[in-house]
Image (tube, rainbow, N blue to C red):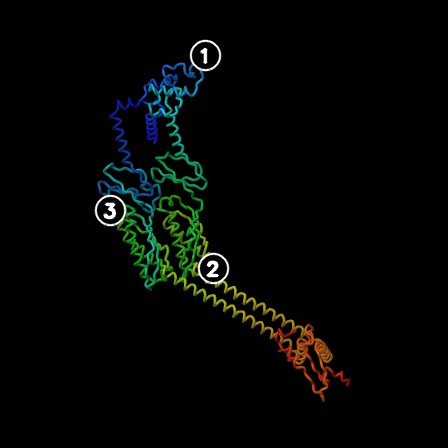
Amino acid sequence: MLRDIWDTHRVAVLAVGAALLAALSSVVVVPETEQAVVIRLGEPNRVINRFRPNTEFGETGAGLTWRIPFMERMVRIDRRILSVDMQSQEVLSTDQLRLQVDAYARYRIIDPVRMVRTAGTTERVGEQLQPIFTSVLRQELGKRTFQSLLNADRGAAMVQIRQNLDQQAREYGAQVIDVRIKRADLPEGALESTFARMQAAREQEATTIRAEGQKNAQIIRAEAEAQAAKIYAEAFNKDANFYDFYRAMKSYDATFADPENKSASTLILSPNNDYLRQFRGK
Amino acid sequence: MRTLGTSITRGILAMAGRKSPWGGGKDEPSGADGAGSGGGGDEPPGKSEGPRNPWLPPGGSTPPRRSANIEDLFRTKDGAKRTGGGGGGGFGGGFPRIPQRPDGKSWASIAAGALVVVWLFSSTVHMLGPKDQGIVTTFGSYSHTVGAGVSLTLPWPIQNVDVTDVTSIRRDTIPDSDVEKLMLTSDKNLVDLSYLVRWNIKDLELFKFRLDDPENTVKEVAEAAMRATVAEVPLNDVIGGAGRGKIEQNVRARMQAVLDAYKAGVLIQGVELKKTDPPAKVVTAFQNVNVAQQQAERDQSQARAWAGQVMAIAQGEATAFDKVYAQYKLAPEVTRRRLYYETMERVLRNNDKVVVEANGVTPYLPLSEIRRRPAPVEAAPAATPTGAQ
């Protein structure tokens, strides 16, 4: 049956096949995540699905489009936010301190035609931006003190870096959205001295804490003693004379009348002793 | 769409017909198609009394038959090969034969039809789980988003559905291994830190279409936000509990702000600090501080205990004195004498005593015996607590 068709309509079948092929090669699908520059005979002709802010997805130029086969070529460009990383750079601050900095920038291609002319492909843009990024960052951070690099003041530097980088990125049809420092660390050599400093600080803290503890303990003791002395004085001051007698009695008791240590002392009494007053029978 | 679908179907059918290994293709003479019904095409001409043909009515006048055996099966095949009659030539010879359809047409159309049905069904009907959302694109262009349940779309080359789990909370631990990750604090100290970021997708379209690598972006933004935040807090607040809650809050707010500025479609659920330790190299120094703190604490509590004791003794003695004094006031002379005699009694009872008439006697003191035990005779100082009792 097929052979019959082939035999009778050979020309027609071939024509249909060729037409189908042409149609397929002229249909292009551009997804939401891409924009495409159509190059007609080497010259950028038009942009499909160009990035425009505030366009709802589905209303962008993505989807099926057409091109002239063989005459027009498509360059696909990422439409999303892309990132360029800067790997660990040592930055010298104005106060001659070194800082290890990792940063990243986020950018988007907003002028695809210019990008195609200057860079060619999306990957090349990233490659071209990287050295620019590094030099801009070093330049800008080198104007600031170490402390300000660590602190919130960094925000101002970041804005400046973003602006400078953006200016140069426009050459490649890219817009820099954000620049951020991922890490700002001390370089290897400075780590050791920082550790030493931290250690010394901790040791000092430990010593201070110990001394403080002893001081407080002493104060507590002294206060207690004072308090006790006050209590004694209040009680005994009622009759100093009686206190003398009372305390003497207790003292004799404690000193001589220890039942566990009998005959520890030898007391030599004179008959004139008051204790022996009745002894004399007078 | 319909035309495209049918043309594809036709194409598949045509191809199946051409390459069918089951015979019945276009190369065979039309007679081969018909032969299936009778089974005669498969049999060599000279073997008509072979295995019984199930399609012929039984009880015919055929000569005595024996039941089919394996040899017969092979023989038929060999015979077919020899004569080159059916079986699609050498190509199809090794394949097991599928019985042909009663009406003599090939199975190819049915197989192709089944493939089309499977393809249509699998690419038009989509079952999404309760956590999923799917983005429907028509030729790459965003069409709409479908939620959980069953949804229908156009078949595959036209519409495509990209299903993603949106509500599940993703957890990124940074750093993902156990390595030491040092960060600078505001007082230029270093802290070893690890944390967990929990996030999920807030807006699937943005998440899919806005960023090149959203998962990695979340991590990088987290890292930047964490370092910026820790750089504003002194070391002790990071390590101690005091600053933690604030750091977590700050990082979360910062991350959300940055990601919203990127329109990343990501919602940060929370940031939790898992570990905030001093660097391993100085950890002993930090422990020494703890030891010192405990030591100070111990010193102070010992002092407090001693103080309590001193006070208790003082109060006790003062009270005792007060009581005795109250009695003494009632009868001073008698009480005084009584106390005196009682004390002396105890003192003299427990010691050796010698009564010496002082005049005219030279006392002999056994000094060696006295020296053996030191015996201070002076009264103890007045108010020392230890000397009491």
Q: Is mark 2 on a helix, strand or loop?
A: loop
The amino acid on which the numbered mark 3 sits, given as a three-letter code, is Arg
Q: Earlier in the sequence, mark 2 or mark 1?
A: 1
The N terminus of chain A lies in quadrant = top left
Residue pointed to by mark 3: A117
| CB under 8 Å between discs 2 and 1 | no
The amino acid on which the numbered mark 1 sits, given as a three-letter code, is Gly
| CB under 8 Å between discs 3 and 1 | no
* Label 2: few (<14), some (14–19) or many (≥20) C-alpha neighbours in 10 Å: few
Location of residue B131 (image quadrant): top left
Can you give x and y, in whole percent of width and height, for residue B55 in the image?
A: 42, 16
**Is disc 1 on the same chain as disc 2?**
yes
Chain on which label 3 sits: A
Q: Which of marks 3 and 1 is in front?
A: 1
Residue pointed to by mark 1: B59
Q: Nearer the viewer, mark 2 or mark 1?
A: 1
Chain on which label 2 sits: B
In space, the residues marked 3 and 1 are separated at their CA atoms by: 88 Å
In space, the residues marked 2 and 1 are separated at their CA atoms by: 101 Å
Can you give x and y, in whole percent of width and height, for residue B321 in the image?
A: 67, 75
- Can residue B330 be seen in this snapshot? no
